[in-house]
Image (tube, rainbow, N blue to C red):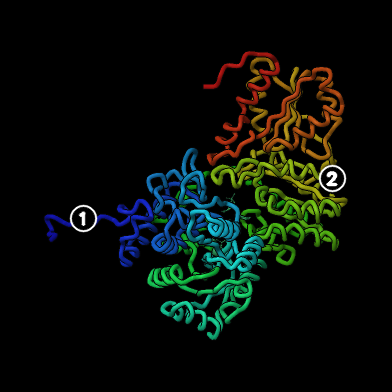
Amino acid sequence: MSDSANPVTVTPILDRVRLPADMKGLSDAELKKLADELRTETISAVSETGGHLGAGLGVVELTVALHAVFDAPRDKIIWDVGHQCYPHKILTGRRDRIRTLRMKDGLSGFTKRSESPYDAFGAGHSSTSISAAVGFTMGRELGAQTGDAIAVIGDGAMSGGMAFEAMNHAGHLGKRMFVVLNDNEMSIAPPVGALSSYLTRLYAEGPVQDLKEVAKGAARAFLPEAFHEGARRAKEMLKGMAMGGTLFEELGFTYVGPVDGHDLEQLLPLLRMLKTRAKGPVLIHALTKKGKGYAHAESRPDGGHATAKFDVATGTQVKAISNAPSYTKVFAESLIKEAAKDEKIVAVTAAMPDGTGLNMFAQLHPRRCFDVGIAEQHAVTFSAGLAASGMKPFCAIYSTFLQRGYDQIVHDVAIQRLPVRFAIDRAGLVGADGATHAGSFDVGFMSSLPGMVVMAAADEAELVHMVATAAAHDSGPIAFRYPRGEGMGVDMPETGVPLEIGKGRMIAEGGRVAILSYGTRLAEVLKAREALQARGLAPTVADARFAKPLDTDLIDQLVANHEALICIEEGAIGGFGSHVAQYLSDQGVFDRGFKFRSMVLPDTFIDHASADDMYRTAGMDAPQIEAKVLELLGVAVAKRA
Ligand SMILES: Cc1ncc(C[n+]2csc(CCOP(=O)(O)OP(=O)(O)O)c2C)c(N)n1
Ligand SMILES: CC(=O)[C@@H](O)[C@H](O)COP(=O)(O)O
Ligand SMILES: [Mg+2]
C-alpha cells in the first residue's frame, strides 16, 4: 500500500513494451494506457527531431491495435507513405533511437526494411502499400513463411492510381488480406468538408456481417468534399460503399466501417474478429484525426503534417532564419507574374500545393490552378491535355515524385512535342527525407528525351529567368529544376527575361582547368575557386544553364582554351556530364588526350542527413571540387581528415 511517505511509483506500460510480443499479455485497459503513453512519447521525440507529426498522432490507436492483434514481423504491417510510422517504430524496438529520427546515421523518417524486420516494406512515396500487401499475400499463398498482410493507407494516398490497381488485383485474387483505410480527411493540403461519425457508433458493436448489413441498409454518410479531385473520387467511392455501396465490393473486398480509428474499444474486438473470420480481402474504413491528441497539431490547417523542432508546451517551432527567399517561393512568385501577363498559363500540382508554392498561385488564380491529388501520372497527362487544348500548363512536381509520371512524360508529352512546362522542385539531395525523396534522376530522364529542353537554375535569380523562358517556350516541352530550401541571397531581377535556349554563361576566367557547372553546385564551385585562387590555381568557371540542348559553342571554347574540363551537377550519372562526355567523344576530343571529369552523385542511395552532409558524402562539396582540380593539375592533394 502506498502512503504519503512512500508513494508507489507506477512504471509506464511503455517502459515494459520493447517489441509487439510484449503487448500480448496486456489487458485492453492497459493497451489504452499504452496508447496514451505512446502519443506522449511521439510528441516528445518529434519536438526534439522535427519531422512528420500529424500523421503519426493520427494512427497511435491503430498502431497499438494492429500490433496487439496481429503478429509482426510474421504478419506484415505495411504503412503507406510511411511518414506516420514513428509510433510503430517506438513499439518495434527503436524507442531508444527515436530521437535520432531523420538525422545522419539515425533512424529513417519512413519505414525501411534494412532498419528493422518490423518494417515489412519501405515507403516514402505514396500509394504503394496495397500492392506490396498483395505481393506478400501471394508469396504466402505460394509457400512463403509469412502471415497476414495489412496495408495501412491514408485517404490521400488512396487517391493514387496504384491503390486502385492493387485493389483491383487483390479482389481478383480473392486471397485473405487487410487494407486499413486511415481516413482523416487530410492529404497534406487541408480539405473542405465534414464527416458524419454517427455510423461509427452504430457499427462498433455489431459483428462484421451486421456491420455490412447496416452499411448496406444504413442511411447516408457525409464524406468530405475533398480539396482535390483525386480524393474527391476516392470519397465518392467510399460514399457509395457506406450506402451499401458497390465499388469496394465489386473489387472483391469486404467493406467494414466506418469505425472510430481512435477508439480501442471498437478497434480491438473488430480486428480480433476479422483476424479470426476474414476469408478474402477486407477493407476497414477507420476515421481518424490528423494530429490527434496534440492541440498544437490538431489546430493547424494541415493537422501538423510536418514540423521543425518545437516546444511541446507552446507548439512554437524552432526554424532556421534565412534572409534569402526559398526557391519554391521564387518559383511561385515568378509564375504569378507570368500568369498576370498571359491568361493561358495554368498550374498543376499533385497534392502538393504548399510544397510547390502553387497555393500562392491558387489564391490569385483559383480557376487556373489544379490539384489532382496524389496522382502524378494523371497530373502529367492532364497537363498534356491542357497543352493540346492551347493552354500553357506549368506542371509543378518534386523531382522524386515526377518519377511516378515518366511514361506519361515520354508517351503523352515528348512524343507529341506538347509544350508542357515542368517545374521540378526538390532537385538534387533533399536532406532529412533521405534517399526516397532525393531528386537525383530528373536530369537524366528528362535530357534523354528528344525535343525536351532541360534547364537548371544556378541560383534564385536564374530561376526567375527560367520561369520566363518556360513561359515563352511554346514549341515543345521544357523543364527547369531547382533545389529544396533557400536561395543564395543574390540580387533579384525585377522581372524574368527569357534566356536564349541552349546558351550558358561564363562566370569567371581562370587558368588551365575549366569547370562547367550545371545547377546550384555553382556556389560550391565558386568556393573551391576562391581557395584555389589563393594558390594561383583558379580555374575558369562557367554555368551551363542547359543540359539540353547543350551549349556546344561554350564547350568548344572551354576545351580550346584549357587542358582539362570538369562538369558538375546535382544528379546521378546519365545526366548533364554524360551528355557533355558524349559530345566530346563524338568530336574526337578524347583522341588527343584532353582531360575530362564529370562530378555526379555516386552510384548508391545516400541515407538521410543534412543536404550539406549528403553532398559531402557524395564528394561534391567545395574541398572535394578543389581536390578534383588539383588532381587534374597533377598537384599532390592532402588526404582529408
Ligand atoms: C507519389 C507521392 N506523391 C506525393 C507525396 C507527398 N505526400 C506525402 S504524405 C502526402 C499526403 C498523404 O495523405 P494521406 O495518405 O491521407 O496520409 P495522412 O498524412 O493524412 O495520414 C503526400 C501528398 C508522396 N509521399 N508520394
Ligand atoms: C511525406 C512526404 O512525402 C512529404 O511530406 C515530403 O516529406 C515533403 O517534403 P518537403 O518537406 O521537401 O516539402
Ligand atoms: Mg489523410
State the image quarter where residue 34 is shown. bottom left
Q: Residue at x 68, y 62 (%)?
A: 371
> How many residues crowd around disc 1 within 10 Å: few (fewer than 14), some, or many (20 or more)?
few
Q: What's the distance in space between the residues labelled 2 and 1, CA to CA?
A: 71 Å
Q: How many marks?
A: 2
Residue 495's spot in the image, x, y percent?
76, 47
Would you place residue 226 above or below residue 375 in this image? Answer: below
Residue pointed to by mark 1: 9
Is 506 displayed left or right of 361 in the figure? right
Residue pointed to by mark 2: 450
State the image quarter where residue 66 is shown. bottom left
Q: Is mark 1 within 8 Å of ligand 1?
A: no
Would you place residue 261 above or below residue 498 in this image? Answer: below
Furthest residue to the front? 143
| Residue 274 visible in this rendered orientation of the protein | yes
Is 177 displayed left or right of 269 in the figure? right
Q: Earlier in the sequence, mark 2 or mark 1?
A: 1
> How many residues crowd around disc 2 within 10 Å: few (fewer than 14), some, or many (20 or more)?
some
- Which of the image's four quarters has the N terminus? bottom left
Residue 431 is marked as none
Marks 2 and 1 in Cβ contact (< 8 Å)? no
Residue 253's spot in the image, x, y percent?
57, 71
Q: Is mark 2 within 8 Å of ligand 1?
A: no
